[in-house]
Amino acid sequence: MPIFLHTADWQIGRQYPAFEPDNAVPMAAARMEAVHHLARLAASEGAQAVLVAGDVFDAQTVSDKTVRQLFQALEGWSGPWVLLPGNHDAALAESVWSRAQRLGVVPPHVHLMLKPEVLLLPEAGLAVLPAPLTQRHTHRDLTAWFDAAETPAGLLRVGLAHGSVTGILAEDIDSANPIAPDRAVRARLDYLALGDWHGARQIDARTWYSGTPEPD
């Protein structure tokens, strides 16, 4: 059975204007250290992949230095990293992702899920179905295409999405980026890896929010 890590909401490059610099700087550094820790964890656990369910970066406007530092941190583990754009770092026509590609800092083992297309990782035993956000907010379920997507037999069928599972919030809250609560069943997924909720939360037997390494 393949082993993979599911993580989300790193929000690398976050600023802390409410704090004094002596406190804000180490808080920002701790977010990058969490990525280094995940690289070490992937190695120690014998993982075949790391799935990052959105909001890798805190904003489209993070500095080039921050972009370089993040991808350098991903070189700490040579297996496949699968990065999904979330609402903070949506795959706009011009985005932090297109900037990273122009800078030439994306290593070959890092997969940017900028389009809703199946990613086959046969050596990891996975077929990843991503639902990248291409704008900050949408009111249609971007995971709907999973239902009809074909994947090869023998690979775990894993969905990767960032948004709000319908029915979690109060009924009078119209949450953006909705995700059907039964998507894993309808799309025949072995696992649905979600981001956006900042605490670990199980939705059903095959659907989880990982939470963030640093809730705040």
Image (cartoon, rainbow, N blue to C red):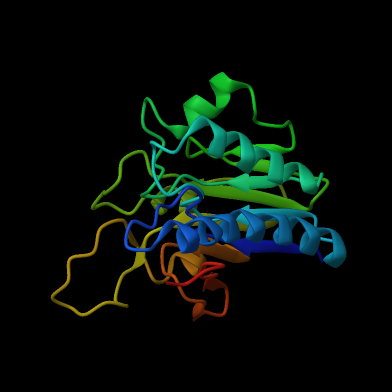
Task: Provide residue 174's location: percent of width, then percent of height.
Answer: 17, 66
- At 84% across and 67% down in the image, what residue appears? 45
Query: Is residue 118 visible to us here?
Result: yes
Q: Give whichever of 15, 38 is nearer the camera.
A: 15
Asked if residue 64 lies left or right of residue 50, the reply is: left
Task: Provide residue 30's location: percent of width, then percent of height.
Answer: 59, 61
- At 70% across and 45% down in the image, what residue appears? 73
Q: Give whichever of 136, 167 is nearer the camera.
A: 136
Task: Provide residue 152's location: percent of width, then percent of height.
Answer: 70, 46
Task: Provide residue 68's location: percent of width, then percent of height.
Answer: 61, 34
**108 above or below 40?**
above
Q: Quadrant of the C terminus?
A: bottom left
Query: Is residue 155 visible to us here?
Result: no
Asked if residue 153 lies left or right of residue 29, the reply is: right
- At 39% across and 44% down in the image, what residue appears? 59
Q: Give whichever of 197, 170 is nearer the camera.
A: 197
Q: Quadrant of the N terminus?
A: bottom right
**48 above or below 98?**
below
Asked if residue 150 lies left or right of residue 152, the reply is: left
